[in-house]
Amino acid sequence: MIQPAQIPAMLALCGALLSACEGNARMPRGEQTVGGITIYLGVVPAEIVQGHPVAPGDPQALHGGTPAGRNSHHVVVALFDAKTGARITDARVAAGFGGRVRGHQPLRDLEPMEINGKMSYGGFFLLRETGGLQVHLEIRRDPKARPVTAAFAYDHLP
């Protein structure tokens, strides 16, 4: 049974959970422009990556192969100059996921990759948590300058 003294703490917890969900609902999902860079983000289950070998241990495997586990996903990021529309191919891109249960993963470098002859950045991630997640990106074109950061909402379904 709930004690009257517990009610304020429970209301605060409910408010925090609702605001986290609401915040995710307002976040961009697949495209945004930050710091003069238009960013496109895609996240797909690793098993549907086509046209590239992905088996762990295969020397030709994309990004060294998929991590073990059924929750492996491929993240791909394409970058464009917001003014000219020119594709950006000289950046360093790092990504990480954040969730309500496990917190924010450390950022990991994405690897340059070609998709249909066009330069993008990608990598595999294990997503153990389901529900509303955030994808955090850090983009560097000049190692001496501050990175451009962006966050996207991603709904990871079981």
Image (cartoon, rainbow, N blue to C red):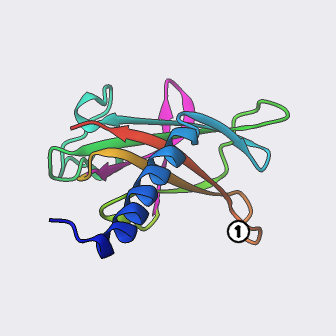
Helix, strand or loop: magenta stretch: strand
Residue 13 location in percent, x, y?
38, 63
Q: How many marks?
A: 1
Q: Residue furthest bottom?
A: 5
Residue 61, can we see it?
no
Which is nearer the eye, 61 or 124? Answer: 124
Left or right: where does residue 137 sit relative to residue 87? left
Q: Quadrant of the N terminus?
A: bottom left
Looking at the image, which is closer to me, 139 or 21? Answer: 21
Q: What element carries label 1?
A: loop
The percent coordinates of residue 54 (x first, y second) are 25, 40
Q: Looking at the picture, tell me which residue is in the foreground, 145 or 30.
A: 30
Residue under pointer 1: 143
Q: Does the magenta stretch include residue 81?
A: no
Residue type at mark 1: give it: Pro
Provide the residue span drawn in magenta.
108-127
Q: Which of 118 and 79 is in front in this view?
A: 79
Residue at x 34%, y 64% (from the top left corner)? 10
Q: Position of residue 20 (x, y in %)?
A: 47, 53
Residue drawn at x 54%, y 48% as measured from the top left: 23
Instruction: State the residue at coordinates (76%, 72%).
Output: 144
